[in-house]
């Protein structure tokens, strides 16, 4: 019995025995302190923390790797910024718990950039690193690096000869002088080739390059041009979400390890860890796809400008049009303008004809209100008869995306959820776009009418109308889930939404820009700029005027955006837009902070801020059940505003005070 009892006591004493045998950790002999940034997007934790490196992890803990540390009693992920010999912390340091991967995915340059972006946007470094570094896939880390590449041969200026300062820009790239330029590209589908030439020049100089584009279609275009220019795809990688997380991480590692020195991708590519960066290209910087919709709400163009400033790399902000922000870089002297002469523009651009022209109105008085005026119909007919395709740009998708009462023109809404009613075909019943319920017995809430009319027409309805107008031509749509990449050089009518216009072999014979009011009448600060960007994107696909290319815009000639399109002068439009922004006190002339949240939370947060004396508060403005306040300061006080907002968010986060308040600096959707 005694022996059996002793065995039971021994079993019960097991946990204490294990505890007594616990390993005593010793810090590493050299540089025992790891300075880390934790992967927690809380403002009061947005600073480096020091941890001891245990001796058994000495070789595994390297700068830039991922580790796990204990913070406030729980294990969290972190990135190692550096290893140092001593700490400035007064108390005892905890140990690094484990190494997730010894792969150094966070370079010193990207860590510095992430810190700068977070400070500029009043955000956290953890949020920026979420954009900069893709999630880990262990299998990708075990794959071998790419094979060595053949040297890149310096190219000729090629198509850049068409621009007065184009060859000089390429020479500066070849000398690694870090040139900064804002480029207005000539019309036509040649811009990927021109970007490829600039990248090839950078690689030939032994430097790295990054090309940032709005979407996958643009990335694929630059990818094809680079592959053709460099004689293969071994010199560059393409990064976008559609390639899948594992493949994206594998390509990211190829860049971080130095196996590849050129990157083409969507907005996160601006953070790519390219070694010895020589050039950053941002194409079509007016596209809102380049603005991050989540914290810290940074724009790829602004990140590229900041990275160019920090590293001395060259920068090329470009597009068929020029944004006010891009022109501000030129007007300040920080960047140079690259544009073609007026004679070259006239040779390359199509002939643009507005339907509001006085001569056209004299021949066709209904042209001002007609959806397809006779001028547009004639240009489309002439192009089809000549065997060329015709492009028709329509701002909205669907058949009839919005309906209204025939009698009083009140917008038709769903009686159940108040959502907008729409039609999916000419024989369909009206359906709510929000809840999907049919509205068979609809009655107008204002006048009691029961008949509906189209208040806007989509691409599908437009294609149906054009099919009747041109019975001998095939009509196809491009937009939504079905986007065409290219169309052949034959009689076709392509109805496309903005951004989904396919390239035509040899160019379009005619381009029709319909429903201009839907773009110009938007309640948005950037309505004119965005309208011009979409028009230029479609019109640039037309043949040159000397080859019969015609563009018809259904709008009055007196509209500034129409004047810029007729003259094909995006620089003039950008100058005018920037002057208006300066006069009105909008970005980029000033810096704005948008605070959105519950009314009490916004008021409390605003009262806790130590704002610059120049700060001007605008609002409040109700938005649904929330409230919006805007803070405006001169541009030189932008850093002080960001610091004040960051401090306020840190205090609010530490105190766990109130509800959430969203803070955005210089948002693209200012209304």
Image (tube, grey):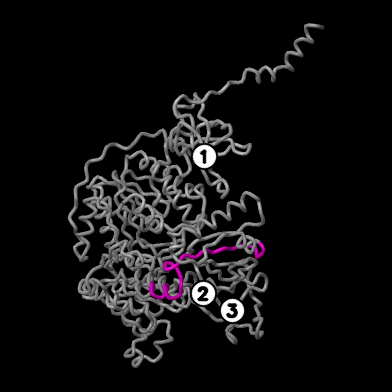
> In x, y percent, where is residue 541?
31, 68
- For the residues bearing labels 3 and 2, Cβ distance under 8 angstroms: no
Question: What separation in Å lies between label 2 and label 1 (alpha carbons)?
Answer: 51 Å
Which of disc 2 and disc 3 is earlier in sequence?
2
Which residue is labeled 1 in the image?
Answer: 78
Q: Considering depth in this image, is 499 or 438 the residue closer to the camera?
A: 499
> In x, y percent, where is residue 472?
34, 76
**Circle count:** 3
> In x, y percent, where is residue 309?
35, 54
State which mark lies toward you, 1 or 3.
1
Residue 64 shown left or right of residue 209 in the figure: right
Q: Considering depth in this image, is 531 or 361 the residue closer to the camera?
A: 531
Question: In this rendering, is residue 42 above or below 661?
Answer: above
User: How many neighbours does mark 2 have within 10 angstroms: few (below 14), some (14-19), or many (20 or more)?
Assistant: many
- Local SS, label 3: loop
Q: Which residues are magenta?
A: 577-600
Which residue is labeled 2 in the image?
Answer: 400
Question: What separation in Å lies between label 1 and label 3 (alpha carbons)?
Answer: 52 Å
Q: Residue at x 58, y 35 (%)?
A: 70
Which residue is labeled 3 in the image?
Answer: 411
Question: What separation in Å lies between label 3 and label 2 (alpha carbons)?
Answer: 13 Å
> In x, y percent, where is residue 147?
29, 36
Q: Residue at x 63, y 36 (%)?
A: 73
**Residue 324: quadrant of the picture:** bottom left
Which of disc 3 and disc 1 is earlier in sequence?
1
Q: Considering depth in this image, is 480 or 251 the residue closer to the camera?
A: 251
Determine the residue located farthest toward the right in the rendered image: 1
């Amino acid at each position: 019995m005694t022996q059996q009892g002793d065995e039971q006591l021994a079993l019960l004493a097991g946990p204490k025995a294990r505890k007594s045998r616990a390993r005593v950790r010793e810090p590493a002999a050299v540089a025992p302190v790891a300075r880390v940034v934790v992967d927690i997007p809380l403002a009061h934790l947005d600073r480096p923390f020091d941890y001891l490196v245990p001796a058994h992890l000495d070789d595994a803990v390297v700068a830039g790797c991922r580790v796990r540390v204990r913070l406030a009693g729980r294990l969290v992920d972190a990135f190692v910024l550096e290893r140092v010999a001593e700490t400035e912390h007064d108390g005892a340091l905890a140990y690094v718990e484990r190494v997730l991967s010894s792969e150094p995915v966070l370079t010193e340059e990207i860590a510095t950039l992430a810190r700068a972006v977070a400070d500029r946007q009043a955000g956290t470094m953890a949020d920026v690193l979420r954009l900069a570094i893709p999630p880990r896939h262990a299998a990708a880390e075990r794959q071998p690096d790419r094979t060595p590449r053949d040297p890149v041969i310096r190219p000729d200026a090629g198509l850049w000869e068409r621009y007065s300062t184009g060859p000089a820009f390429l020479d500066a790239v070849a000398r690694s002088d870090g040139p900064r330029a804002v480029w207005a590209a000539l019309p036509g589908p040649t811009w990927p080739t021109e970007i490829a030439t600039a990248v090839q020049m950078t690689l030939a100089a032994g430097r790295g390059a990054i090309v940032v584009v709005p979407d996958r279609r643009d990335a694929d275009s630059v990818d094809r041009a680079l592959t053709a220019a460099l004689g293969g795809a071994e010199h560059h990688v393409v990064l976008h979400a559609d390639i899948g997380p594992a493949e994206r991480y594998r390509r990211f590692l190829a860049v971080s390890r130095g196996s590849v020195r050129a990157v083409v991708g969507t907005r996160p590519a601006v953070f790519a860890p390219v070694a010895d960066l020589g050039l950053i290209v941002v194409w079509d910087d007016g596209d809102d796809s380049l603005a991050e919709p989540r914290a810290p709400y940074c724009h790829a163009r602004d990140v590229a400008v900041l990275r160019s400033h920090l590293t001395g790399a060259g920068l090329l902000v470009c597009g068929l049009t020029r944004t006010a922000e891009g022109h501000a870089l030129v007007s300040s002297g920080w960047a140079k303008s690259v544009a073609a002469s007026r004679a070259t523009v006239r040779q390359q651009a199509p002939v643009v004809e507005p339907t509001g022209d006085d001569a056209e109105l004299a021949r066709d008085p209904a042209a001002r209100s007609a959806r397809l005026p006779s001028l547009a119909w004639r240009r489309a007919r002439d192009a089809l008869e000549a065997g060329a395709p015709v492009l028709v740009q329509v701002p909205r998708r669907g058949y009839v995306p919005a309906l209204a009462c025939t009698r009083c023109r009140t917008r038709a809404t769903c009686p159940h959820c108040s959502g907008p009613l729409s039609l999916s075909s000419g024989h369909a019943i009206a359906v709510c776009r929000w809840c999907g319920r049919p509205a068979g017995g609809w009655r107008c809430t204002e006048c009691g009418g029961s008949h509906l009319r189209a208040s806007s027409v989509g691409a599908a309805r437009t294609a149906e109308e054009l099919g009747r107008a041109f019975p001998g031509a095939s009509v196809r749509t491009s937009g939504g889930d079905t986007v065409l990449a290219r169309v052949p050089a034959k009689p076709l009518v392509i109805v496309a939404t903005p951004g989904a216009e396919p390239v035509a072999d040899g160019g379009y014979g005619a381009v029709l820009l319909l429903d201009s009011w839907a773009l110009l009448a938007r309640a948005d600060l950037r309505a004119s700029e965005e309208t011009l960007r979409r028009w230029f994107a479609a019109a640039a696909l037309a043949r040159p005027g000397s080859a019969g290319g015609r563009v018809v815009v259904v709008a009055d000639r007196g509209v500034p955006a129409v004047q810029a399109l007729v003259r094909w002068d995006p620089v003039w439009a950008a100058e005018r837009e920037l002057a208006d922004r300066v006069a009105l006190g909008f970005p980029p002339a000033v810096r704005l902070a948008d605070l959105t949240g519950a009314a009490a939370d916004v008021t409390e947060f605003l009262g806790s801020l130590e704002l610059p004396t120049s700060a001007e508060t605008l609002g409040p403005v109700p938005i649904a059940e929330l409230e919006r306040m805007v803070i405006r300061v001169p541009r030189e006080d932008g850093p002080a505003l960001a610091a004040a907002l960051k401090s306020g968010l840190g205090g609010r986060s530490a105190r766990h005070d109130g509800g959430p308040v969203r803070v955005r600096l210089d948002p693209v959707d200012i209304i």
